[in-house]
Amino acid sequence: MHKKNRSNLAILMAVLASLSIAAYLFMAYQAAVSGGDTSNLMGAAAVLFMILSLICLYYGGREFRLGTYSRSSRLPGLLLPLVASFLWLGTYILGILS
């Protein structure tokens, strides 16, 4: 069976997860520069980006299980949301525990 070249949904999830990772790095830098004194708006944005990363992980994982598209186009759609979710959830859980 011939596989299609790329999964557009997996690529979209990889792009959105990359945006979430960039937001994480920016917010972590801002928190470090300001000594942890960040605005409530930044905290709300962080929660929204965390939710976005979890949604991307769900759809990226669902798309990865499909054998219709090439594996090389599906893999970033799973790995980048996994990294983003790990970063956001790890920080969130560390914040709760401390």
Image (spheres, rainbow, N blue to C red):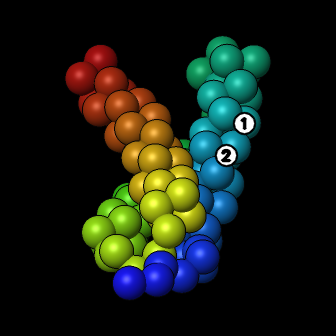
Q: Amino acid at mark 1?
A: Phe
Q: In this view of the protein, which residue sits in the foreground, 89 or 38?
A: 89
Q: In screen coordinates, is 77 left or right of 25?
A: left
Extreme residue toward the left, this view: 97
Q: Amino acid at mark 2?
A: Ala
Residue 37 x/y as whole percent: 63, 26
In the rendered image, which quarter contains the C terminus? Answer: top left
Residue under the image location 60 percent in, 22 percent down? 36
Residue 30 x/y as whole percent: 73, 29
The answer to whether one can see residue 28 in this image is yes
Query: Callout 1: helix, strand or loop?
Result: helix
User: For residue 26, which numbered disc appears in the image?
Assistant: 1
Q: In screen coordinates, is 68 left or right of 43?
A: left
Q: Is the Cβ of the residue at disc 1 closer than 8 Å to that at disc 2? A: yes
Could you say which quadrant of the image residue 92 lies in?
A: top left
Q: Which residue lies under the disc numbered 2? A: 23
- In space, the residues marked 1 and 2 are separated at their CA atoms by 5 Å
Query: Callout 2: helix, strand or loop?
Result: helix
Q: Residues within 10 Å of mark 1 (few under 14, many from 20)?
A: few
Extreme residue toward the front, this view: 1
The answer to whether one can see residue 40 in this image is no
